[in-house]
Image: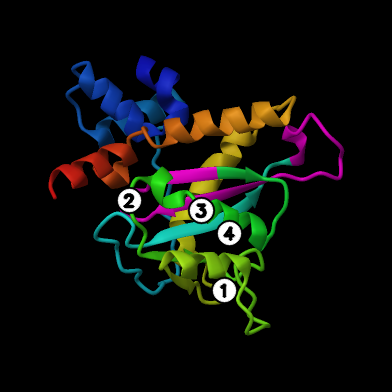
Amino acid sequence: MKKYRKFGYEGLAEVYVKARKEGYSRTYDSMCKIIRKMKGNAKEKPKKQHKRKKKVEQAKYPGERVQIDIKYVPEECIQFGTRDQKYYQITALDEYTRKRVLRIADEKSTYQTAKFLENLERELGFDIKKVQTDNGKEFTNSESDKKTLFELKLEEKGIEYVTTRPYSPWENGKVERSHRLDSKYYADKKFKSKEELLRAIRKYNTRYNNISRKVLGFKSPNEVLKEYKENQ
């Protein structure tokens, strides 16, 4: 399929939506089978047996719960500066719309995560009720009663804050899974300057928020948000 060759890297849901707009009439599952045959892999992958996990309650509106996490920008992508300088991607993902906001930081600290919160609601396009993170020290400090800069900023903005339980990464699973997509994005990227890195991430995030997702009923995060606002 031509659409798969052009849009496959953005996910099969986006391929399906593009194909439907040009008259494709088969089901999504049928399209997936055709693509598997085209790739020489006609058999469906056996489903993995997952351990039963505590069911996570689904968000009912934008901003009800926003997951935040941080990941390394792979060192091999950075073709500027010194070897000792590392870069990090701070990610916020709204559970209802799956809309994301990304920021590049040059240190992994509560200063940077607190700074990230300053304009987050404006960039998402809605108010945030609750933020959820893991127990990383760039967010919280379980060894002290003193609140971190990140926690103080949330308090200042009137946003509730919860952390995931220890050894329960699935509780922040949506943002964790989005980071796997980011790893694929970074795999073949080389940035010659910090400005190029920042510009590329802005463009990448804009595109991410406009890509159709199967989990969203073949809509993009921005389409889900627009639809929600129109129905209020």
The disc label shown at residue 114, or none: 4
Q: Please state the total of marks drawn on the protein image.
A: 4
Task: Find disc 1 in the rendering and name its residue.
Answer: 167
- Amino acid type, callout 3: Glu
Label 2: element kind: loop
Kindly identify the residue that appears in the image at 37 percent across and 14 percent down.
Answer: 2
Is residue 123 toward the left or the right of residue 127 in the image? right
Task: Find disc 3 in the rendering and name its residue.
Answer: 118
The residue closer to the viewer here, 46 or 199, is: 199
Q: Quadrant of residue 167?
A: bottom right
Counting residues from the start of the chain, the first of labels 2 and 1 encountered is: 2
Residue contact at pointers 3 and 1, CB within 8 angstroms: no
- Give the x, y percent position of residue 57: 31, 68
- Amino acid type, callout 2: Phe
Is residue 55 toward the left or the right of residue 231 in the image? right
- The CA span between labels 3 and 1 is 29 Å
Viewer can see residue 41: no
Residue contact at pointers 4 and 3, CB within 8 angstroms: yes
Task: Find disc 2 in the rendering and name its residue.
Answer: 126
Crowd rating for badge 1 (residues with CA inside 10 Å; few <14, some 14–19, many 20+) = few
In magenta, the rendered stretch is 75-102
Q: Quadrant of residue 220?
A: top left
Kindly identify the residue that appears in the image at 79 percent across and 29 percent down.
Answer: 79
- Give the x, y percent position of residue 199: 59, 28
The residue closer to the viewer here, 125 or 46, is: 125
